[in-house]
């Protein structure tokens, strides 16, 4: 590992820690606003939490791609990736400094002053250059993960630019235009980073099992193209209730229903994945990949139900949306990235203390996820059916959110123990 | 074949984006943003109101959805002004000057005129989709 990459790797893990810590502190401020609104204001803590999560996913995904691609590139040309990593680390630090001084001005998840986005954009162009160098020399274009990485990297660029179009007056001429474009880009951007992360997941499966057909099968390519189609059209479920043209909703609804194919495929392959690779079960990366598989199934089911407008009428704007967001960012993205990080720091063994931490993390996440779903059902029912005032609905969800809070604490502690082990490993690696 | 399909999907993405930016968002007649509302939108972002409040169900969970607070017969503009001016048990007082509060109110009025955040039962079609009056 070169020095900048080591720093970037550690920086990425620190972002995961800040996500967890700020999540717990923000939850405290959410549950007890009267006590904490002055010293720990929620509107200041939430951006720390959500931006840390987004940056953890993006730095984690790019660190993984770099790690698996840099050996193809001549040493002096690896400079592009180093520049990318340096720019992004500096930009992220500037973002947190802005948050500390209450300097906001952006949009949801990217709430910092928008001028900082120029740094992120420049940095990303260097990363594209790095990937292009890899693409040129790599002769194996049959593996689907190569295409997934390419898709994720390119579409992140497209959606990132699109997400900043609001700075041009024409794009916020009407509120519907502004909201539609904003959530189109947000939805598709998630699809873009999922491509990078799912690509990493397939790469790891191939490396751990030694079975190359995982990355070249018809199922792998079918899933990839279906995922890409969903990236393009499926964002509409975020804005079902915005009075845009009805055909936009119909397209999003129809395309999102194709995701049942994923669910059926996952269920069919479950037995093989759970019991067919017993020789790898002692490896931590394999366990993380397996956990991610379970979380993919659970979150896909939730997403499918939320994508039916008649159900979305009850779930939209409730904690079910949070359950879906947290379930995917922690259950899927973080599990795969942890698999990746524990793989390239030496294929960590699943035993002893790490095994205990892993199990507590999975159980905590499950309680956390269910707690949010129950709170969301409660909110949806009381707001839509009973039409109770917001204050009463908020109070009714608090007991469930306290369970979520406690599960969040155990989840954070267990993850921090696993991260500590990865830190140790990276410091001893060459 | 993979390469061709990939290029085709990129072209589809670009074409669909152009359609959304034009026909998709111009089809419904909407009130254009005023200078005052644009100022209010910037204040909304600078004070990070979206961390706690929702517009069309998108945003935070600490406070209520305020898409239609201005036209709400039980709340309305005076209610919104009072909260912005003084804060509440959960909401901090941002100590905004009157002109900034006016701009925020102009922004909320503009949002309110764009539609209704809640979907009525009658707007759900038999196949589970919404048919919102255009």
Image (cartoon, coloured by chain):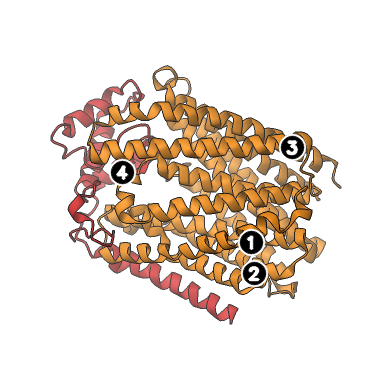
Distance in Å between CA atoms under marks 4 and 2: 39 Å
Q: Are marks 1 and 3 in contact (CB under 8 Å)?
A: no
The 10 Å Cα crowd at callout 3, few under 14, some 14 to 19, many 20 or more, is: some
Query: Where in the figure is residue A254, as x and y percent of width and height?
Result: 37, 66
Colour in which chain A is drawn: orange
Q: Label 1 lies in what chain?
A: A
Q: CA distance from mark 2 to mark 3?
A: 31 Å
Picture disc at residue B55: 4
| Distance (Cα) linking label 4 and label 1 | 35 Å
Q: Is residue A275 above or below residue B93?
A: below
Disc 2 target residue: A144
Label 1 Cα neighbours within 10 Å, binned few <14 / some 14-19 / many ≥20: many
Q: Nearer the viewer, mark 4 or mark 2?
A: 2
Which one is closest to the eye, mark 1 or mark 3? 3
Q: Measure the C-alpha gap from mark 1 to mark 2.
A: 7 Å
Element type at marker 4?
Answer: strand
Which mark is on residue A199?
1
Q: Quadrant of residue A178?
A: bottom left
Nearest to the observer: residue B122 or residue A322: B122
Label 4: chain letter? B
Chain B: its colour in the image is red
Please determine if labels 2 and 3 lie on a single subunit. Answer: yes
Q: Residues within 10 Å of mark 4 (few under 14, many from 20)?
A: many
């Amino acid at each position: 590992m070169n020095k900048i990459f080591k720093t970037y790797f550690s920086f990425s893990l620190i972002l995961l820690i800040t996500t967890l810590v700020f999540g717990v502190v923000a939850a405290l401020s959410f549950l007890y606003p009267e006590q904490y609104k002055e010293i720990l204001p929620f509107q200041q803590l939430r951006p720390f939490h959500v931006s840390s999560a987004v940056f953890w996913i993006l730095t984690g995904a790019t660190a993984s791609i770099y790690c698996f691609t840099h050996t193809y590139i001549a040493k002096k040309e690896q400079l592009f990736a180093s520049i990318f990593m340096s720019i992004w680390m500096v930009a992220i630090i500037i973002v947190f400094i802005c948050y500390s001084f209450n300097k906001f001005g952006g949009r949801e998840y990217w709430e910092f002053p928008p001028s900082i986005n120029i740094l992120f954009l420049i940095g990303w162009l260097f990363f594209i250059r790095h990937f292009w160098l890899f693409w040129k020399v790599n002769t194996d274009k049959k593996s689907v993960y190569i295409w997934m990485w390419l898709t994720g990297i390119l579409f992140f660029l497209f959606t990132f630019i699109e997400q900043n179009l609001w700075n041009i007056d024409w794009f916020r001429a009407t509120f519907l235009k502004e909201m539609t474009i904003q959530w189109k880009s947000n939805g598709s951007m998630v699809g873009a980073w999922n491509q990078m992360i799912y690509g990493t997941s397939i790469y790891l499966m191939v490396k751990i099992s030694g079975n190359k057909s995982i990355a070249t099968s018809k199922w792998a390519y079918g899933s990839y193209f279906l995922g890409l189609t969903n990236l393009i059209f499926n964002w509409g479920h975020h804005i079902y209730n915005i009075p845009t043209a009805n055909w936009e909703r119909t397209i999003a609804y129809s395309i999102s229903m194709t995701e049942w194919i994923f669910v059926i495929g996952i269920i069919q392959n479950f037995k093989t994945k759970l019991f067919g690779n017993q020789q790898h079960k002692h490896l931590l990366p394999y366990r993380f990949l397996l956990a991610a598989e379970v979380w993919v199934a659970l979150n896909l089911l939730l997403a499918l139900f939320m994508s039916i407008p008649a159900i979305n009428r009850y779930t939209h704007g409730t904690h079910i949306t949070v359950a879906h967001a947290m379930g995917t960012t922690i259950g899927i993205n973080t599990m795969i990235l942890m698999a990746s990080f524990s793989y390239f720091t030496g294929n960590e063994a699943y035993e002893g203390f790490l095994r205990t931490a892993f199990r507590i993390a999975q159980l905590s996440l499950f309680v956390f996820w269910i707690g949010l779903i129950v709170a969301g059902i409660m909110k949806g029912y009381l707001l839509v059916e009973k039409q109770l005032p917001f204050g009463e609905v908020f109070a009714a969800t608090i007991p469930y959110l306290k369970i979520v809070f406690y599960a969040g604490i155990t989840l954070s502690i267990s993850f921090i123990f696993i991260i500590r082990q990865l830190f140790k490993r990276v410091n001893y690696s060459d | 074949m993979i390469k061709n399909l990939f290029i085709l999907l990129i072209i589809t993405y670009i074409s669909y984006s152009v359609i959304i930016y034009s026909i998709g968002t111009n089809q419904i007649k909407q009130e254009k943003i005023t200078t005052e509302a644009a100022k209010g939108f910037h204040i909304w972002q600078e004070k990070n109101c979206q961390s706690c409040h929702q517009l069309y169900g998108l945003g935070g969970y600490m406070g209520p959805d305020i898409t239609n607070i201005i036209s709400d017969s039980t709340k309305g503009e005076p209610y919104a002004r009072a909260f912005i001016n003084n804060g509440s048990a959960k909401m901090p007082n941002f100590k905004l000057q009157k002109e900034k509060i006016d701009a925020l109110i102009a922004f909320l009025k503009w949002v309110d005129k764009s539609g209704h955040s809640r979907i009525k039962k009658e707007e759900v079609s038999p196949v589970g989709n919404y048919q919102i009056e255009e």
